[in-house]
Amino acid sequence: MKADQPTAESHPDSDGWLGDFRRGPAVFSLYREPAHPLAPAEYRIECNDGAGPRVICRFVDQPDTVPEWVTAWSGDEWCEWILEQARRLIAEPENT
């Protein structure tokens, strides 16, 4: 997984979009990545703070895995809050 890769234009009905959440001026979007049915679920988080959406984190939904943050976000004080919101959307997606 490479969190620094740019994202293509997305569409909520066809790209794994699970929902959005916001903090201050930033809007965060959570997507489930396509994966093999036997593999653990993989997710990406995008942030749009007015400069267009950018991938900021990728993670696997399994215990003891470490999220992969882009360098600019690594260690940011919002990271834990962002992951909490993402896990909330995994449990109760907006797209259902």
Image: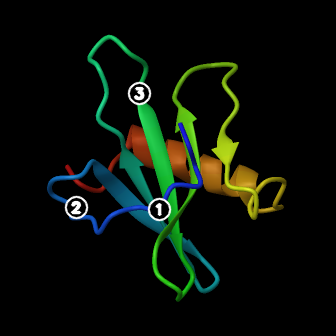
Give the label on residue 51, or none: none
Q: In the rendering, at what x and y percent does residue 54 appear? A: 51, 68
Tag 3–tag 2 contact (CB < 8 Å): no
Of all residues, the one furthest to the top in this rendering is 38
First along the sequence among labels 3 and 2: 2
Distance, label 3 to label 2, CA atoms, is 18 Å
Residue corresponding to mark 1? 6
Identify the residue shown where x is 59% and y is 50%. Answer: 57
Name the residue rendered at 56%, 21% in the picture: 62
Whole-percent x and y of residue 36?
A: 29, 19
Residue 26: percent from left, percent from top = 58, 79
Q: Which mark sits nearer the N-terminus, 3 or 1?
A: 1
Q: Which residue is mark 2?
A: 12
Question: Is label 1 in a helix, a strand or a loop?
Answer: loop
Q: Quadrant of residue 29?
A: bottom left
Q: Which residue is mark 3?
A: 41
Report the mark closest to the observer, 3 or 1: 1
In the drawing, does residue 50 fall left or right of residue 65?
left
The reply, left or right, for residue 14 in relation to residue 22 is left
Q: Quadrant of residue 91?
A: top left
Q: Is disc 3 surrounded by few (<14), some (14 to 19) or many (20+) residues within 10 Å?
A: some
- The 10 Å Cα crowd at callout 2, few under 14, some 14 to 19, many 20 or more, is few
Q: Which amino acid is tagged 1?
A: Pro
Q: Is residue 16 above or below residue 39?
A: below
- At x 31%, y 27%, the residue is 35
Nearest the eye: 56 or 89: 56
Q: Compared with residue 4, is residue 52 higher up or lower down, i.e. above or below?
A: below
Q: Badge 1, how many Cα within 10 Å: few under 14, some, many 20+?
A: few
- Residue at 23% across, 54% down: 95
Pointer 2 or 1: first along the chain: 1
